[in-house]
Image (cartoon, rainbow, N blue to C red):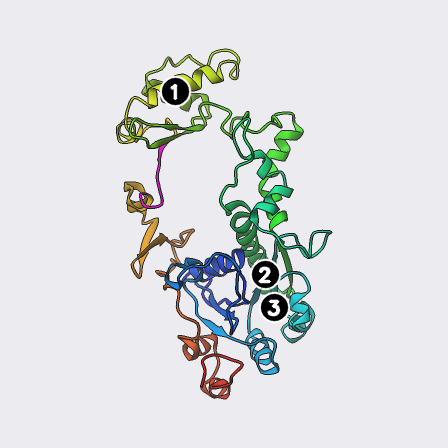
Amino acid sequence: MGPLAGLKVVEFPAIGPVPMCGMLLADLGATVIRLERQQPAADLGVERPLKYNLLLRNRPSISVDLKTPDGARFAMELLDSADALLEGFRPGTMERMGFGPEPCLARNPRLVYGRMTGWGQTGPYAAMAGHDLNYIALTGALDAIGRKGQPPTPPLNLVGDFGGGALYLALGVMAAVYTVRSGGAGQVVDAAMVDGAASLMTPFFGMAAAGLLNPERGTNVLDSGAPYYDVYRCADGKYLSVAPIETRFRKTFFDKLGLDSDIQAGDPRAGWEALRERIAARIASRTQEQWCAIFDGTDACVAPVLSIAEAPLHPHTRTRATFIDVDGVSQPAPAPRFSGTPSATPRPPEPVNSSYEQCLRAWGWPDTAIAHWRGNPAVGPAA
């Protein structure tokens, strides 16, 4: 069920963006099998109980010892009928294990080989370890995020891992699958978080080239420099997001706030700090709920800043079912939405090998092939 029903993907062991990409494809209906290590890797990523490791939802996993001949053969037989492969090792690792693009594409010329790294497959940093913060630091993204006079602010790991990583890997894989289904050959997709994060910065590079972006963070319209694009504390300690960039929306905002609508006459930056103080004082005079009652339904571009606990309870997200409950865990629903091929409700993360035979049947393997591997110490559950 979903627009990617029928797509078959093998996901090799990884953390962060590769599981996110696997989740996105599975949420949209792809049949994804995760290959897990037989012995979990120590000190890798952020540990959490399986039930709450939501990036692993919606797809089964099989433990495989890829360093053994039997484990390697099992994985290759899965890849023989796969549409795509997802891997997130350092450059050269898959080649050393015998799963580089050359042998995989030789066996399955239609395979889309999706590679996810931080620094990319080439370059002086390619072999170095790193994390989201490092990748966005190299692209200009991190330097641009933060307040005036303050150090750059780490924006969770959304920009590198997930925005510049998982989403670009998913887009690249599906673009290559489209090529295959249009008569082309399989190919390698080199998705690097440093490249994806740089791509996300495209409009800001354009603004900088045009002289429209001040190089000092926290002094531009979209980085907290403008008083009408910021967050403000309410009387109850909660916050409002304020973002009326356009003049007509700003007029509505000032009217609802109770400030003069012509307050921005003349040089728009000349009175930014004085205006910020006036806005802050007004917003501090009422609670977040009181302000929502004033701004909701208007074009003032104001919304409450909600916590993770509060977000699923808001009337808008509840009406749209933006968040759903799966196995007692509140979580974001699959996105985007499709009118003709809607996604099914995700299945919760499941223990490794818990649906070993069922997932191989769903992959298209006959019972004889499944029986052949049953009890093999290199693959799946212990005999």
Q: Can you tell which mark lies on residue 279?
A: 1
Label 2 belongs to which residue?
88
Q: Position of residue 212 (x, y in %)?
A: 61, 25
State how far apart marks 2 and 3 are (Cα).
Answer: 17 Å
Residue at image point 50% right, 41% down: 155
Residue drawn at (36%, 28%), measured in percent from left and top? 233
**Image height check: is 259 above or below 24?**
above
Mark toward the start of the polypeptide (2 vs 3): 2
Q: Between marks 3 and 1, how big is the CA–CA gap?
A: 56 Å
Question: Which quadrant holds the N terminus?
Answer: bottom left
Amino acid type at mark 1: Ile
Which picture quadrant has residue 137? top right
Which of discs 3 and 1 lies nearer the camera? The answer is 1
Q: Which residue is mark 3?
A: 111
Tell me, yes or no, whether the highlighted magenta stretch contains residue 345.
no
383 relative to 130 in the view: left or right: left
Q: From mark 2 to mark 1, how far is it between C-alphas? A: 47 Å
Give the residue type at disc 2. Answer: Gly
Disc number for residue 369: none
The magenta segment: 302-310
Q: Was residue 304 drawn as part of the magenta stretch in this picture? A: yes
